[in-house]
Image: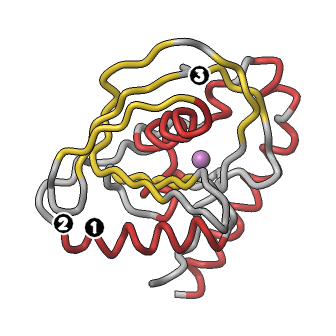
Amino acid sequence: MTILRIRKYGDLILKKRCEMVRDEFNNIKRLIDDMFETMYANLGIGLAANQVGVLKRVIVTDVGTEGARKPIYLINPEIIEMDGEEILEEGCLSLPEIKGEVKRKKRVFVRGLDTEGKVVKIDTIGILARAIQHEIDHLDGILFIDRMDKNQKKALSLRLNKLRKATKRELRSLSEGK
Ligand code: CO
């Protein structure tokens, strides 16, 4: 397994819509292993494929603890039902040290595929429901800061600009190093 480089705010891949996985399930298995490894190494509770540079509809989450992990992944996840509303603070591995309150649905009923191509259904509430919504947003190019209210986002604008510039610098030096 490999720890992949996490794409940070300012990297345009985070704004892109990921494509459905059709038949490359063997490659996807390895991608999922690497995404879990990357998520755990960075102490995250969720990760979407475009955050590691792959434009495929794949998410991983783990809202468990180190002693009792609860790894969950979904290929081509799709929310079928959602209800309730809750405002809670969120963060994101692509936006280190940035936190903000986001209104999301309390419950989601989501459907996706496993690595055998079989249908998986998850009906959940609380932190897992939130993580799934956050990660599916990533697949559509949406970040949690895009769902924050305007004033909250404005209050973060200096830090966001700084982060975006740092990412652009990092991307430039990576491409020069090639
Ligand atoms: Co995120």
Identify the residue shown where x is 62% and y is 29%.
Answer: 146
Left or right of 103 in this view: 157: right
Q: Secondary structure at mark 3?
A: strand
Within 10 Å of the Cα at label 1, are there few (<14), some (14-19), or many (20+) other Cα atoms? some
Q: Are marks 2 and 3 in contact (CB under 8 Å)?
A: no
- Residue at the spot 18% in from the left edge and 45% down from the top edge: 119
Asked if residue 84 lies left or right of residue 50, the reply is: right
Disc marking residue 25: 2
Which residue is the site of mark 3? 104
Q: Quadrant of the N terminus?
A: bottom left
Amino acid on which the number 2 mark rests in the picture: Phe
The CA distance from mark 3 to mark 1 is 28 Å
Residue 42 lies, in percent from the top left, at 67, 68
Front-most of 88 and 66? Answer: 66
Residue toward you, 80 or 173: 80
Rendered location of residue 54, percent (x, y): 38, 62
Question: Regarding mark 1 in the picture, which secondary structure is present there?
Answer: helix
Q: Quadrant of residue 41?
A: bottom right
99 above or below 34?
above
Mark 1 highlights which residue? 28
Q: Position of residue 123 (x, y in %)?
A: 39, 31
User: How many callouts does the rendering have?
Assistant: 3
Residues at circles 2 and 1 in contact by the CB criterion of under 8 Å? yes
Q: Of marks 2 and 3, which one's residue comes earlier in the chain?
A: 2
